[in-house]
Image (cartoon, rainbow, N blue to C red):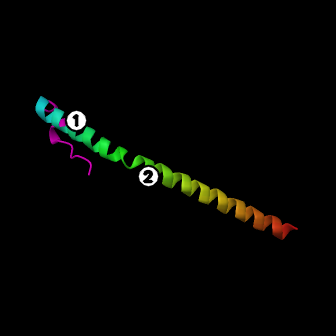
Amino acid sequence: MLPEKPACLDAKGGCPGWEAYSFNDAVKAYNLQAQAFRPIAESYAQKLNAYVKASADYAQCEINAMQN
């Protein structure tokens, strides 16, 4: 889950150092966890693109068959 942004970040004076550093550390930890899913997401995108291409190729083949 994405770390909750402290309200002080939007405040005029900003956050005290410790709170800003804590939030920054939480975001870094979140990003490291998210990186673990990157290869899975990339693999899914590649498979999805291959499926879309195969679908388009099949549709074109059917169109060609009807025109002959």
Q: Residue at x 85, y 67 (%)?
A: 67
Q: How far from the left and from the top, in percent, is residue 13?
A: 14, 30
- Tag in front: 1 or 2: 2
Q: Is residue 43 magenta?
A: no
Q: Image check: 24 left or right of 45?
A: left
Residue 25 against residue 34 in the figure, above or below: above
The residue labelled by disc 1 is 24
Q: Amino acid at mark 2?
A: Ile
Q: How far from the left and from the top, in percent, is residue 30?
A: 27, 44
Q: Is 34 or 21 nearer to us in this picture?
A: 34
Q: How many marks?
A: 2
Ranked by sequence position, the earlier of labels 1 and 2 is 1
Q: Image check: 4 left or right of 35?
A: left
The residue labelled by disc 2 is 40
Hey, which residue is sitting farthest bottom in the picture?
66
Which type of secondary structure does the marked residue at label 1 adopt?
Answer: helix
Q: Residue at x 17, y 41 (%)?
A: 6
Q: Image check: 30 left or right of 36?
A: left
Q: How far from the left and from the top, in percent, is residue 33?
A: 30, 46
Q: Which residues are magenta?
A: 1-15
The chief SS type of the magenta part is: loop
Q: Is 41 or 19 nearer to us in this picture?
A: 41
